[in-house]
Amino acid sequence: MFKKIYDYIMEKGLYKLFLPNPIGTQHLKGDIFGGLTTGVVALPLALAFGVSSGLEQGAQAGLYSAILLGFMAALFGGTAPQVSGPTGPMTVVVAGFIATSSQPQHVFAAVILGGLLQITFGLLGLGHYIRYVPRSVISGFMTGIGVIIFLLQIQPMMGVKSVSGPLKAMAGALGAVTQINGAAFVLGLVTIALIYLIPRISKAVPSALVALIVATVAAELLKLDIPRIGALPAGLPQLQFFIPSADALPTIFLAALSLAILGSLDTLLGSVVVDNVTGTKHHSDKELVGQGMGNMVSGLFGGLPGCGATMRTLLNIKTGGRTALSGVIHSFLLLGVLLGLSRFAALIPLSVLAGILVTVGIGIIDYHGLKLLPKSPNADRIVLILVLFLTVFVDLITAVQMGFLVACLLFLKNLSDREITRGGSLTPMVLNESPEAQLLAEQVRVIQAEGPVFFGTSEAFILALEEDVTDLKAIILRMPRVPLIDQTGAFTLKEFVTRMAEKGIQVVISGLPSEPESVLRDLQIIPDILSEDSVYPSLAEAVVGLNAKIAAHTSPVLIPQPYLHKVGG
């Protein structure tokens, strides 16, 4: 089996997705400065996300992820200046999984398997499908993530032990007030204030890092009795070897699938942003492979899952980073912190990290999308609100799945409403003025169909065709502008022709393109339901053929090119 997979990868040239990116020096100065800056910014975020994950050794797991995933994704990814590491959405999934799993080792198994799934996504070429995710789904999802991060920091900000989910955070908020550690809460508020105030004074230094240092030093000088991160290992991460039981595999797989889909989605959205900012073009599938490799390595050494971090990536670009070298430098800086400064990181108050994450949650919320909500189409409003609600109160992957499904259904509903319209009336001309001939000519209608006839438009299609068919003897259905018919559309047409036959109305078709005709023939609708002499290459030939049939029973009537009823635009 593995040999077949290997041969397939080599034959299709997919091995190129696993090749490391060249580390050049054409942007050396910018890459060094960008890497150092993002490394400094990533330090407090990695620690904060690690602690909020719920893992016992969360801070170090966050730092391991920023180092290992950041390095591997930069070296093997498909978006040159992308900076990767633990992020809010991925941490939320981990926190939810830890709340339901009896063994923390299952988390690392899920991270490894999630990385393997991401590599599979890349090999299958799924990276390009990011463009099909509706904006309303993304907006509701990101806003929901921001709300979750904010809610989960309520207890830590108060100096109270954190909880595992947003519902528990809301339920326990009042109880936490009675247990509040005043010093921790004030320190958290100071952290938030510094993060927002420092950029107004100077943007030369990362405000989150300055706030972290100032608040931690203040806590030490004042000898505050508040919860801290605690001791971190002062060395390289150790390989985690763990084989889960068969009973745990389904749960681990579902968590891994959630991480893989969410991480891929978040990363590729960031890659699109990078393209817009730099004028470059990322390689979606290679980016997924690089992220997958990074997550696998992170899981193997006890690190959190992560993905492309859009804000850190934009900071990297803004400060000069342009190639993979900047991401590599970012990882080496964090490695240096792990090896030399871990004893100082142990002193950081948890309320300070909570304050940092509060600002992260606030920043993730899509205010622009919410501002436009009253002016947006009904379908977009429904999807955004649904995804936001499911993200906060159910889970992230369900939110994305349901949002995408509802968006597709509403789009098809809107498409069917627009594609199928009717208007006008047939005004035939006759060659003789006999009342019989005039009456007969008025009983023949020409209808033009435009656009695809598929499961999304089939019901409206048949309703439009059956509108006002009283006293008709024949219908000519023009179809040169119908590019495709699926099985549902074909059987809808069959149903329409059968119903018309029961009413004594003959249906003929003109101008049917080859692809829809092939579908109708494969399904034996032609010739079983529509006989061969009911299908004509053009409207003119259909008119001649229908006149011949009419003439055999009544006085000669010429049906000229009429004003067309339109089915579609």
Image (tube, helix red, strand yellow):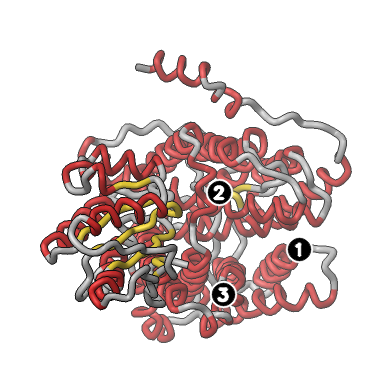
- Pick whichever, 235 or 4, lies toward us: 4
436 is higher (above) or lower (below) than 283: below
Q: Residue at x 64, y 38 (%)?
A: 78
CA–CA distance between discs 3 and 1? Answer: 27 Å
Give amino acid for label 3: Gly
Whichever of labels 2 and 1 marks the residue nearer the N terminus, that label is 1
Identify the image quadrant of residue 462. bottom left
Q: Which numbered circle lies on residue 369?
A: 3
Residue 553, visible in the rendered structure:
yes
Give the structural element (helix, strand or loop) at label 2. Answer: strand
Give amino acid for label 1: Pro
CA–CA distance between discs 3 and 2? Answer: 23 Å
* Residue highlighted by disc 2: 307
- Pick whichever, 28 or 479, lies toward us: 479
Q: Residue furthest left?
A: 502
CA–CA distance between discs 2 and 1? Answer: 21 Å
196 is higher (above) or lower (below) than 9: below
Q: Residue 307 appears at what percent x and percent y?
A: 55, 49
* Residue highlighted by disc 1: 206
Identify the image quadrant of residue 20. top right
Q: Residue at x 37, y 73 (%)?
A: 426
Q: Residue at x 43, y 74 (%)?
A: 379
Q: Residue 13 appears at what percent x and percent y?
A: 56, 21
Give the structural element (helix, strand or loop) at label 1. Answer: loop
